[in-house]
């Protein structure tokens, strides 16, 4: 009886730190850590979990919110049907007028400070307070969120199994606003060795496995040039020491606008890149109720008969076939 009472009290104390958000059933957690990056934390957790579950961190793009990226991407819907938890970090206007994650600010991309460390604190909070399978932690993001995704993968490779970068920027492509604009246009000049060294030298004593990476990018992206996808591909290919040629599939899944490139190592897909024609700077979605469908059309979410979230979750190993 006492043990039952203690469990009830513990649950009440945990819930008192939540601010309920009606849309998408997201819940705000306000006391997750030191929060030097001054971000907000929202979570989606399927209701009847009595076992350890995977965790996905989803980073929104500029001018977006946690609720908007949840609705547009369909991540919460997939989480409900496949039993995993989602964290949606949210930027504040006082940090960035356009609500972009500050992927080009030295403090915010640091391992031990700013937004990068704050997002890591959110993950640590989830591990400590929920039943999380620590071998199945993933991260994904679009645009500025894609750039920050690459930063988290490079900063904490031991934390993530895989990551997904949509319309993102390579690691250490910029360190201020001026170089950020150059990076977005693909005009940062480094050798292949320098791009790879940016990640390896960021982790000089790390000898573990690096995350697998899937990349999505619009061929005609007017804001973040597709050169960035090519550099990200090369950067992680170098980190994984992949020397074999990729398998390239045009008209992937019958879609003439999608080209898929896959690099294998030990017969396992390690790096996958989807180049999407006529997408611009957006997330590819496919509204509907069929298995491979999902997401909703919005300003930065375009119907391409291709649900990038589904294929990301498939790459992560989260889809229950």
Image (spheres, rainbow, N blue to C red):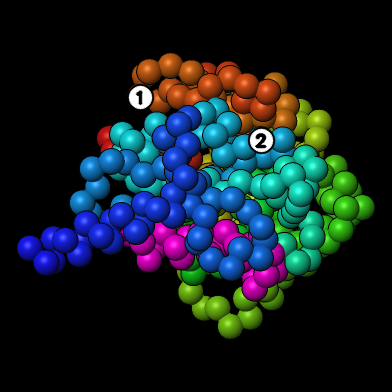
Numbered circle sitting on residue 291: 1
Q: Describe residue 228's horizontal placement relative to residue 76 as left or right.
A: right
Quarter of the picture containing the C terminus is top left
Q: Earlier in the sequence, mark 1 or mark 2?
A: 2
In the image, residue 120 lies at what x, y percent? 54, 63
On screen, residue 281 above or below 30: above
As helix, strand or loop, the secondary structure at mark 1 comes to loop
Residue range in magenta is 110-133
Asked if residue 117 is among those painted magenta in the image, a careful observer would answer yes
Q: Main secondary structure of the magenta part?
A: helix
Q: Describe residue 268's horizontal placement relative to residue 50 as left or right.
A: right
Residue labelled with disc 2: 64
Residue depicted at x 56% and y 55%: 244
How crowded pointer 2 is (Cα within 10 Å; few <14, some 14-19, many 20+) is rated as some
In the image, residue 207 lies at what x, y percent? 52, 78
Toward the left, the furthest residue is 1
In which quarter of the view is residue 195 placed?
bottom right
Numbered circle sitting on residue 141: none
On screen, residue 102 above or below 288: below
As helix, strand or loop, the secondary structure at mark 2 comes to loop
Asked if residue 128 is among those painted magenta in the image, a careful observer would answer yes
């Amino acid at each position: 009886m006492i043990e039952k009472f203690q469990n009830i009290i513990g649950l009440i104390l945990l819930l008192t730190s939540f601010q309920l958000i009606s849309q998408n059933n997201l819940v705000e957690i306000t006391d997750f850590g030191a929060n030097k990056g001054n971000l907000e934390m929202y979570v989606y957790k399927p209701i009847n979990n009595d076992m350890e579950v995977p965790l996905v961190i989803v980073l929104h793009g500029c001018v977006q919110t946690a609720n908007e990226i949840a609705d547009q991407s369909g991540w919460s819907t997939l989480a409900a049907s496949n039993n995993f938890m989602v964290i949606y970090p949210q930027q504040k206007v006082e940090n960035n007028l356009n609500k972009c994650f500050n992927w080009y600010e030295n403090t915010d991309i640091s391992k031990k400070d700013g937004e990068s460390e704050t997002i890591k604190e959110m993950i640590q909070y989830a591990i400590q307070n929920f039943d999380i399978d620590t071998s199945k932690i993933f991260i994904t993001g679009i645009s500025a969120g894609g750039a920050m995704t690459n930063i988290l993968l490079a900063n904490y490779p031991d934390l993530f199994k895989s990551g997904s970068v949509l319309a993102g920027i390579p690691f250490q492509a910029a360190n201020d606003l001026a170089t950020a604009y150059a990076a977005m246009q693909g005009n940062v000049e480094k050798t292949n060795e320098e791009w790879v060294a940016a990640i390896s030298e960021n982790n000089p004593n790390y000898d573990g496995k690096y995350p697998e990476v899937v990349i999505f990018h619009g061929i005609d992206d007017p804001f973040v040039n597709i050169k960035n996808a090519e550099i990200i591909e090369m950067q992680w290919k170098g980190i994984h020491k992949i020397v074999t040629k990729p398998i390239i599939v045009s008209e992937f899944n019958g879609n003439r606008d999608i080209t898929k490139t896959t690099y294998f190592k030990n017969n396992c897909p390690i790096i996958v890149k989807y180049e999407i024609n006529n997408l611009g700077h957006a997330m590819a979605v496919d509204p509907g109720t069929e298995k491979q469908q999902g997401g909703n059309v919005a300003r930065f979410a375009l119907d391409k008969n291709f649900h990038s979230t589904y294929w990301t979750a498939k790459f992560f190993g989260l889809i229950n076939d």
